[in-house]
Image (spheres, grey):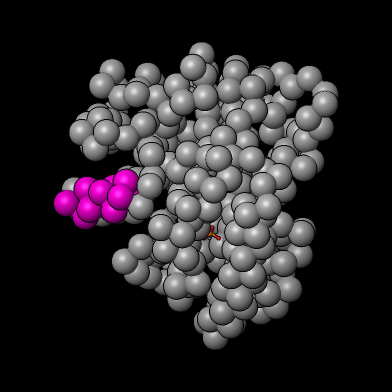
Amino acid sequence: MTIDLHCHSRASDGALSPQELVAHAAACGVEMLSITDHDTVDAYALINRHEPLPLRLVPGIEFSAHWRNRGVHVVGLNVDPGCASLNEAVTRQRLARDKRAERIAERLEKAGAANVLEGATRLADGAPVGRAHFARHLVDTGFVSCAREAFRKYLGDGKPGDVKHVWPGLETVVEWIRDSGGIAVLAHPARYKLTGARLAMLVDEFRRAGGRGIEVISGNQTLDVTRRLGTLCADSGLLASCGSDFHRPECPWARLGRFPALPSACRPVWSEWMS
Ligand code: AMP
Ligand code: MN
Ligand code: MN
Ligand code: MN
């Protein structure tokens, strides 16, 4: 079965509407999909649950959190998008994002960029404003030549536009996910550029906070990384997830549902809702 449990729609910083994303995933052969927008479940309100879908949709979200002076992401899978406490959490994250957007805009304007908050807000078009929208504004106004440059110079880890202390701790976001009936999964563990020992510490603290799984496969990582994460996952007694972190069809390195098999020692997270 082709499964992809991490991707983004226009309800956050993806390029496709939720309906287009579902259709595109089905055309790519995906049979089970979770749309995991940053800090919002709005995509699920835009999909008509009464119309037959071309694949099995597992409601999800990608929460922003804070761990030891670092921004980390936690995916919630099989959540109830209508759950009141989840929607309170989403509102709280929205306020944090708005506050963060103001700070990011101030810092980018100090660095010489213009109309930053207005530009990024317009590009977000009602979605929670994220760094991808700031990057696009910097490209569109000619301040940088591409999104990569925007992140490398202004928005990436440790750069002026990297404002992360607005986010709640791991325990809080894991609790939000559990309260809405979902399974908390640590997103793209290899992307935090942690040493093996620090990553093991993060995974251990995540597990003790009630986290149940990690993304053993994320996007187009190397087989070596997949093997190491598979071992960490199995040794920690956690469930294994896989997701492309797809944002737009133009990125050939992050296509929907193109994965190698999970390492055999791993128990797949979907066994939790398929049994
Ligand atoms: P945010 O949730 O607002 O902190 O933004 C995180 C998002 O920024 C990620 O999900 C990606 O969509 C995007 N992003 C992060 N790093 C990069 C990068 N180096 N190049 C392009 N996009 C990036
Ligand atoms: Mn994103
Ligand atoms: Mn992420
Ligand atoms: Mn993501």
- Residue name at image x 20 percent, y 33 percent: 235
- Residue positioned most to the bottom: 110
- Residue closest to the eye, 54 or 181: 181
Q: Reply above or below: 227 against 175.
A: above
Which residue range is magenta in the image? 197-208
Could you tell whether 102 is left or right of 264 in the image? right
- Residue name at image x 45 percent, y 43 percent: 184
Q: Reply above or below: 8 against 102.
A: above
- Residue name at image x 67 percent, y 47 percent: 83
Query: Residue 259: where, in percent of width, then height?
Result: 43, 24
- Residue name at image x 53 percent, y 81 percent: 107
Among the 4 quarters of the image, the one containing residue 88:
bottom right
How many marks the image carries: the answer is 0
Q: Is residue 222 magenta?
A: no
Query: Residue 211: where, in percent of width, then height?
Result: 38, 45
Query: Residue 257: where, in percent of width, then height?
Result: 52, 25
Could you tell whether 33 is left or right of 149 in the image? right
Query: Residue 36: where, in percent of width, then height?
Result: 58, 42
- Residue positioned most to the left: 197
Could you tell whether 198 is left or right of 259 in the image? left
Q: Is residue 199 magenta?
A: yes
Among the 4 quarters of the image, the one containing residue 124:
bottom right
SS assignment for the magenta stretch, majority: helix
- Asked whether the viewer can see residue 7, the reply is no
Q: Reply above or below: 5 against 95.
A: above
- Asked whether the viewer can see residue 165, the reply is yes
- Residue closest to the eye, 111 or 46: 46
